[in-house]
């Protein structure tokens, strides 16, 4: 009994599939033309088609053409939209590339007194200024030390000269006092005489 049920179900499935394939073939335009050709009558070398079948076929052809035209219009719209999307994407890509280029330039440059300088140029200028200031500082330290040494020597010489001058002045005062005493003694001798 199970075998009979299995055979019956396989038979019904195959008949149903054949009917669907046959039905799909009849629904296509080619299938409809074949069906009309098969069912039409022959007269000499001509085929006679009934008006109803012709009108039905005509309507189906017009419907198919209309559907194809609508499909073509829809595809053209989609192509146009895709073209616009591609164009917009290309414009965005161009703008992004320009922005990227500007960002890279900005990243690789530094603004100094309103001028955009390459980082290498900026570094060269900065280190040249630092080196120049360092050299100037060393020069002024050298000059200060030299001047300081000369000043100390001059102060030392001045102290020596002042000391010598004090000695000389004291000697001169002593000599002058001695001469005045002698002069006074002479004046006193002259008066006493």
Image (cartoon, rainbow, N blue to C red):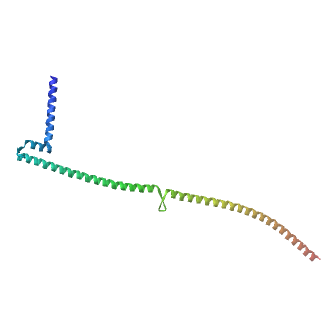
Residue 21 spot, x, y in % from top left = 15, 38
Residue 3 in the figure: left or right of residue 161: left
Residue 24 in the figure: left or right of residue 87: left
Residue 81 spot, x, y in % from top left = 26, 53
Compared to residue 173, the image places residue 80 above or below, namely above
Q: Residue furthest right?
A: 193
Residue at left offset 60%, top offset 58%:
134
Q: Residue furthest front?
A: 44
**Quarter of the figure that contains the N terminus:** top left
Q: Residue furthest left?
A: 43
Q: Nearer the viewer, residue 96 or 169?
A: 96
Q: Nearer the viewer, residue 191 or 30?
A: 30
**Quarter of the figure that contains the C terminus:** bottom right
Residue at left offset 83%, top offset 69%:
172
Compared to residue 156, the image places residue 22 above or below, namely above
Q: Residue furthest top?
A: 1
Residue 138 spot, x, y in % from top left = 63, 58
Compared to residue 117, the image places residue 42 above or below, namely above
Compared to residue 90, the image places residue 162 above or below, namely below
């Amino acid at each position: 009994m199970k075998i009979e049920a299995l055979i019956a179900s396989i038979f019904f499935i195959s008949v149903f599939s054949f009917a669907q394939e046959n039905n799909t073939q009849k629904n296509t335009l080619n299938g409809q033309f074949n069906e009309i050709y098969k069912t039409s009558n022959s007269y000499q070398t001509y085929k006679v088609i009934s008006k109803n079948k012709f009108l039905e076929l005509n309507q189906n052809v017009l419907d198919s053409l209309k559907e194809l035209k609508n499909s073509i219009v829809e595809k053209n719209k989609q192509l146009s939209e895709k073209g616009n999307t591609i164009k917009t994407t290309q414009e965005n890509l161009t703008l992004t590339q320009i922005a990227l280029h500007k960002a890279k330039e900005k990243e690789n440059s530094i603004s100094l007194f309103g001028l955009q300088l390459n980082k290498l140029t900026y570094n060269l200028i900065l280190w040249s200024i630092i080196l120049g200031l360092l050299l100037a500082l060393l020069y002024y330290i050298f000059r200060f030390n030299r001047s300081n040494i000369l000043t100390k020597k001059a102060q030392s010489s001045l102290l020596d000269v002042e000391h010598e001058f004090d000695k000389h002045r004291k000697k001169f005062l002593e000599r002058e006092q001695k001469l005045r005493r002698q002069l006074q003694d002479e004046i006193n001798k002259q008066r006493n005489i």
